[in-house]
């Protein structure tokens, strides 16, 4: 089974270049800090979209099961993954009206589809 989990968000005004630098310095640690059954795929800037409020940046994870979400939640409480997430969150724009989205996508060959 495979899932893709995507978080779309905006970065606080004037901090995008700083976020880019932070990512360059921390992506290897982010990848290494992921719990078993999860993978940090990367963080991407939107260059074209028809969506108005989905966010300008997307962080994408690959998960091996629904249970991987529980392992991510546990890893977020302490340790290196918690540090990385805490620092990453300081760049976010959480004002009303800022873009945000979340998707959990399941591989279509593993999905139950009727009709």
Image (cartoon, grey):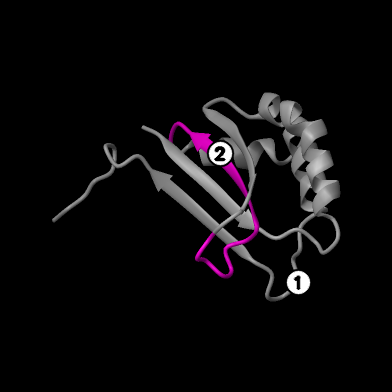
**Closest to the observer: 16 or 69?**
16
**Residue 92 is at least partly visible in this image:** yes
In the rendered image, which quarter contains the N terminus?
Answer: top left
Q: Are marks 1 and 2 in contact (CB under 8 Å)?
A: no
Dot 1: element: loop
Name the residue located 73 percent from the left edge and 34 percent from the top edge: 81
Q: Is residue 56 magenta?
A: yes
**Residue 79 is at least partly visible in this image:** no
Q: Which residue is mark 2?
A: 61
Q: Which residue is mark 1?
A: 95
Label 2 environment density (alpha carbons within 10 Å; few <14, some 14–19, many ≥20): some
Taking 95 as reference, is 36 above or below it? Answer: above
Find residue 6 and report its horizontal and vertical position in percent: 54, 48
Residue extending furthest bottom?
Answer: 96
- Label the magenta part by its dominant secondary structure: loop
Q: For this view, does 111 lie left or right of residue 13?
A: left
Find residue 108 and report its horizontal and vertical position in percent: 29, 42
Name the residue located 52 percent from the left edge and 27 percent from the top edge: 37
Dot 2: element: strand
**Closest to the observer: 90 or 13?**
13
Chain-order first, disc 1 or disc 2: 2
Q: Write the start and end of the magenta stretch as one range.
A: 49-66
């Amino acid at each position: 089974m495979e899932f893709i989990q995507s978080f779309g968000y905006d970065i606080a005004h004037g901090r995008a270049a700083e976020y880019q630098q932070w990512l360059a310095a921390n992506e290897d640690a982010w990848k290494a800090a992921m719990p078993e059954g999860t993978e940090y795929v990367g963080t991407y800037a939107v260059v074209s979209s028809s969506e108005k409020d989905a966010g300008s940046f997307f962080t994408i994870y690959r998960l091996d099961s629904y249970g991987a979400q529980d392992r991510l939640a546990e890893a977020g409480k302490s340790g290196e993954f918690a540090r990385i997430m805490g620092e990453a969150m300081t760049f976010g724009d959480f004002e009303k009206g800022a873009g945000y989205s979340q998707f959990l996508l399941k591989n279509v060959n593993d999905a139950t589809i009727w009709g």
